[in-house]
Image: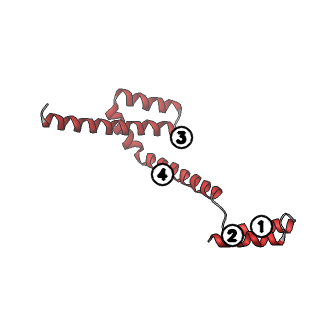
Amino acid sequence: MTFWDFFWLMISFLLYVSYLVVLFLIVKDIFADSTRTGWSKAVWVLVLIFLPVFGGLAYLIAFGQSMSLRQAARRDVAKEDFDDYVRRTAGTNQAEQIAQAKTLMDDGALTADEFAAVKERVLRQQ
């Protein structure tokens, strides 16, 4: 195998993998789109199976913009979910910890000395 044979083999492999990535993204988008009926999804999948290059180009031309909008919406929802998770699992700030200790002291669960110790420990953490 010459250098150029190997070179074109690598280029062909790269193009083939790129094509497969685009094809799977299109199939993922077809099934993720809730506005389409089942029959239209089936037709698009059949077009992609029997006319893969033409079907892929036709889908990207027809639905490329809405495909990117749906992907951006999914990304925004995932970011909001992650931010909400971080807010729920992150520790409370100093003022909230002192307020919780004060509530416990008012309810009689903590003495004044214990409240002072909690307050001192929280303020020392900074």
Q: Report how far apart the C-alphas of labels 1 and 3 lie in the structure.
A: 51 Å
Tag nearer the camera, 3 or 4 = 4
Earlier in the chain: of badge 4 and badge 1, it is 4
Q: Which residue is mark 2?
A: 122
Quadrant that contains the N terminus? top left
Residue to which mark 1 is pinned: 101
Image position, residue 31 (x, y; %): 50, 36
Between 4 and 42, the residue placed more toward the observer is 4
Mark 2 element type: helix
Find residue 17 and name its label: none
Q: Nearer the viewer, residue 118 or 30?
A: 118
What amino acid is found at the position of numbered circle 4 in the picture?
A: Ala
Measured in 3D between alpha carbons, the distance from the residue under mark 2 to the one under mark 4, in whole angstroms, is 41 Å
- Per the model, the C-alpha gap separating discs 2 and 3 is 52 Å
User: Tag 4 or tag 2, which sits nearer the N-term?
Assistant: 4
- Per the image, the residue denoted by label 3 is 35
**For residue 80, side relative to residue 116 (left or right):** left
Q: Quadrant of residue 102?
A: bottom right
Q: Earlier in the sequence, mark 3 or mark 4?
A: 3
Q: Nearer the viewer, mark 2 or mark 1?
A: 2
- At label 1, which amino acid type do we have? Ala
Provide the secondary structure element on which disc 1 rests: helix
- Residue 53 place in picture, x, y as percent: 32, 34
Quarter of the image for residue 58 reads top left
| Contact (Cβ within 8 Å) of mark 2 with mark 1 | yes
Which comes before the other along the chain, label 2 or label 3? 3
